[in-house]
Amino acid sequence: MTQSKKLEIQNITKQFHTETILNGLSFHLNHGNILSIVGPSGSGKTTLLRILAGLEKPTDGTILMNGKDITKQKAYRRNISLVFQQPLLFPHMTVKENIVYGAKVSKKYKAEKIETLLEAVGMKRFSNYYPSEISGGQQQRTSLARAMATEPEVILFDEPFSSLDPSLRKDLRYWVRNFLVSRHTTAVFVTHDMEEAMIMGDEIAVFKKGTFQQIDTAEILFKKPSNKHVASFLGGHLIINDKEYVSLQAITVTPPNQKIGGQHFDATVEHMTYQYGSPIAHLHIRNLNKKVSLPVKGELPPRVELHIPPTSIQRFSEEHS
């Protein structure tokens, strides 16, 4: 069965004076799918979300919703919700009143729907609490319920967990993912954290300086990164040069002068740690001037060799500047 395109952008460009912030971006998102956009801070991710939401205009390009051109449509007519980095709840309103406000503004208020949302986000027993009386994670759940109360066709998330502590952040992203999937909600999720992008998205768009470097599933990104930027941002690879890389899983660490076939590199052991039940060697590869961390079986001498089977060396599918 062919999936319908819910949201599509075609050659979106954004310029401020002489600076190009977004450079010819294109993607499409099918109904019920989640796209993670991952990249470093300042790369243009938030600007793209603001354009999708109608808060900014693109310099060029087209935005389609259900096949209809909404590029020039006002934000309040787009039926797109935006969940921000900070919860941005009204402090003088209770949890329930905050959710009701979003529904009434969009003229989609139904009392039973509000109760259902409170139950769904686990906030029913806190419905009469004020934002100052609940945790950061509970505030962000309330923000999500308020966004859902408007019955949006697409929800945009702008790094919604970045201000939370690591343990809460980890729990909440699994919860939000399951919540969106259970309701077949179409969403775009922006983050600078690759692990978070992999958890949240059906597909991941790797972003750099206003361009998409690659859009694929997490598995394809890892197995076939298109260029060294994608491989570097993903982690788990040793980039040998601009055209070649190898998965860290294929590398064997041995003492010097071991007669093992394939390519090898001399490395210095900078220090050892113990993580996830295994010793980890943190190494500096001298002739590549790169650092890698690899699980090993035990203590190592100060200098070691890294051995790579010739069949494990892969080539990037394309090169970006």
Image (spheres, grey):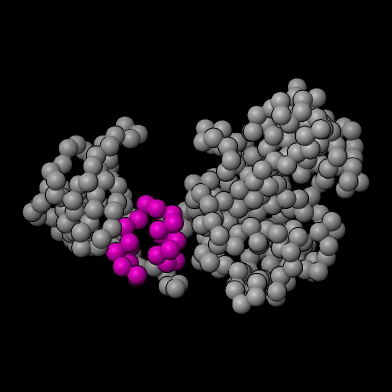
* Quarter of the figure with residue 139: top right
Q: Quadrant of the N terminus?
A: bottom right
Q: Position of residue 50 (x, y in %)?
A: 70, 59
Residue 186 vertical placement versus 146 (above, below): below
Residue at position x 51%, y 57% in the image: 40
Residue 90 or residue 229, whichever sits in front: 90
Disc count in the image? 0
* Quarter of the figure with residue 140: top right
Query: From where the camera sits, is residue 202 visible?
Result: no
Horizontal relation, residue 181 to residue 165: left or right: right
Residue at position x 43%, y 54% in the image: 234
Q: Position of residue 282 (x, y in %)?
A: 26, 46
Query: From where the camera sits, is residue 283 visible?
Result: yes
The residue at the far bottom in this view is 18
Q: Position of residue 24 (x, y in %)?
A: 62, 73
Q: Quadrant of the C terminus?
A: bottom left
The residue at the far top in this view is 125
The magenta region covers 223-245
Residue at position x 53%, y 46% in the image: 196
Residue 77 falls within the magenta-colored stretch: no
Horizontal relation, residue 275 to residue 160: left or right: left
Horizontal relation, residue 16 to residue 265: left or right: right
* Quarter of the figure with residue 124: top right
Residue at position x 37%, y 52% in the image: 236
Horizontal relation, residue 51 to residue 93: left or right: left
